[in-house]
Image (tube, rainbow, N blue to C red):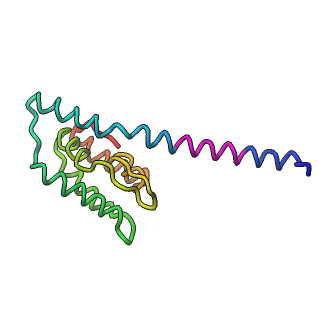
Amino acid sequence: MKLDTQDKYVKYGLIAGGLYVGYKIIQFFAGNSNSIAAATNEVKTLTAKGVKPTYPDSNYTQWASSIVSAGFNTLGTNEQAIYAIFRKMMNDLDVAKLIIAFGNQRVEFSFQSAPLGAWLSTELDSNELATVNKILSDKKIKYQF
């Protein structure tokens, strides 16, 4: 069976597209895999500089659970609940503690787990993620997701 030129282009396009998608998935998870370790180092650095967390550790754990619950909402992601949690963050230490408390959580419709930044990227579209980032940047918090 001889493939015509158009069939060859379709075949090569599908292969290239599949490779690109695979590359982006690997890049996505690899790029975010060390965020918990980086947040842990950030907590040590900020604490050594005398920065105090705004809340007790139990609050960050509760908010991490609330973020996961907002993502697994039966009617779709509850973006407002996620925004409300990020509005409570007052400094970089608060966000670092939230990242640590979040750990790696299962991504919806997947068997993969991801840290907070990667998890948010799967749950929120670019406009919603921009809203989270604006909430943080308005408070002079350096973290961006």
Which quadrant, please, contains the C terminus? top left
Find residue 23 and report its image quarter: top right
Q: Is residue 24 left or right of residue 92?
A: right
Residue furthest right in the image: 1
Q: Give residue 102's position: percent from left, percent from top.
A: 26, 50
Q: Give residue 16's position: percent from left, percent from top.
A: 67, 42
Closest to the observer, 105 or 98: 105
Q: Give residue 32's position: percent from left, percent from top.
A: 38, 40
The magenta segment:
13-24
Q: Residue at x 12, y 33 (%)?
A: 47
Q: Is residue 30 left or right of residue 38?
A: right
**Residue 17 painted magenta:** yes
The vertical placement of 7 against 65, above or below, is above
**Residue 5 painted magenta:** no
Q: Is residue 58 left or right of residue 68?
A: left
Residue furthest front in the image: 111
Magenta segment's dominant SS is helix
Residue furthest bottom in the image: 74
Closest to the observer, 44 or 138: 44
The vertical placement of 106 against 40, above or below, is below
Q: Residue at x 41, y 60 (%)?
A: 108
